[in-house]
Image (spheres, rainbow, N blue to C red):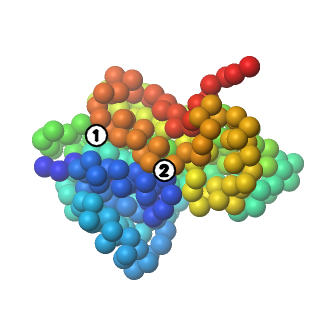
């Protein structure tokens, strides 16, 4: 039976790159984003040339949407082998931490952190249920996409950094709790990745990269993150549940 995956926030950028790599590697993939299904018709035609893909509208900050997403995978395929929690948003306006608004802070926490935490909870409970069904070749995994902002201060978008740091702890908590259930949980930390989200500050990042902020002097691509996800899916890292995979061109290396 074909293995299946959910990738949240997968209409574009990193999430889409992850979905494509999973399709190429034989997974059936359920994509989701906040756009209506009618808006992604062309994209789904493209993806279905790579493999078996479907799409459901989902806002991960809405509890009912989260439940519908997990249920959709069960109803369509009867299994969920991989849950990739990628969906997230940037600050609508970058503000100094002395000026950050409560509205912006709450929005980032609700979507990036609360959404990811409860997606982990729902996915984990569904995977535990599926393990009890005795599915063939069933070794489920959860993979959370965070950011180098989980440990890197950016005072003009503090709420984003805090939300990503929270995802790191979310990963550790679920890795700890689910170890006894045989469900590994991993974190992938992208660095400076060329996407729509970073396009608005592309010139700034190009300069930093050229000056050596990352040992590998190029923008990361969604495919670089997707390959880390595939590594986490492979089973070769399972004994290292809770492991962080850095997709950052070496940014995490402390250098003199």
Please determine whether, in this image, residue 16 is positioned above or below residue 177.
Answer: below
Residue 168 lies, in percent from the top left, at 55, 36
Name the residue tied to disc 2. Answer: 222
Q: Residues within 10 Å of mark 2 (few under 14, many from 20)?
A: many
The CA span between labels 1 and 2 is 23 Å
Q: Is residue 33 visible?
A: yes
Q: Is residue 106 left or right of residue 239?
A: right
Q: At 25% from the left edge and 56% from the top edge, which residue is drawn?
A: 28
In the structure shown, which secondary structural element does the residue marked by tag 2 occupy?
A: helix
User: Looking at the picture, how far across and down is residue 252, in whole percent?
Assistant: 62, 29
Residue at x-position 19% and y-position 55%: 78
Q: Secondary structure at mark 1?
A: loop
Quadrant location of the C terminus? Answer: top right
Q: Number of marks in the image?
A: 2
Give the residue drawn at x 40%, y 41%: 227
Q: Which residue is mark 1?
A: 140
State the mark number for residue 159. Answer: none
């Amino acid at each position: 039976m074909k293995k299946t995956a959910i990738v949240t926030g997968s209409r574009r950028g990193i999430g889409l790159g992850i979905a494509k790599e999973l399709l190429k590697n034989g997974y059936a993939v359920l994509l989701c984003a906040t756009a209506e299904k009618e808006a992604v018709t062309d994209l789904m035609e493209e993806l279905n040339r790579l493999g078996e893909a479907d799409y459901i509208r989902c806002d991960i900050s809405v509890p009912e949407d989260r439940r519908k997403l997990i249920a959709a995978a069960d109803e369509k395929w009867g299994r969920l082998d991989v849950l990739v929690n990628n969906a997230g948003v940037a600050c609508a306006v970058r503000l100094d931490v002395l000026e950050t608004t409560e509205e912006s802070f709450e929005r980032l926490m609700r979507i990036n952190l609360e959404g990811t935490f409860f997606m982990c909870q729902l996915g984990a409970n569904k995977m535990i249920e599926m393990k009890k069904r005795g599915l063939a070749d069933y070794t489920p995994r959860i993979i959370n996409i965070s950011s180098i902002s989980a440990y890197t201060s950016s005072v003009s978008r503090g709420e984003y950094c805090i939300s990503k740091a929270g995802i790191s702890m979310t990963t550790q908590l679920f890795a700890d709790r689910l170890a006894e259930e045989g469900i590994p949980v991993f974190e992938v930390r992208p660095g400076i990745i060329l996407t729509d989200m970073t396009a608005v500050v592309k010139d700034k990042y190009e300069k930093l990269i050229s000056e050596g902020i990352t040992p590998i002097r190029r923008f990361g691509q969604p495919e670089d993150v997707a390959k880390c996800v595939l590594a986490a899916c492979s089973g070769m890292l399972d004994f290292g549940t809770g492991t962080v995979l850095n997709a950052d061109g070496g940014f995490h290396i402390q250098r003199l």
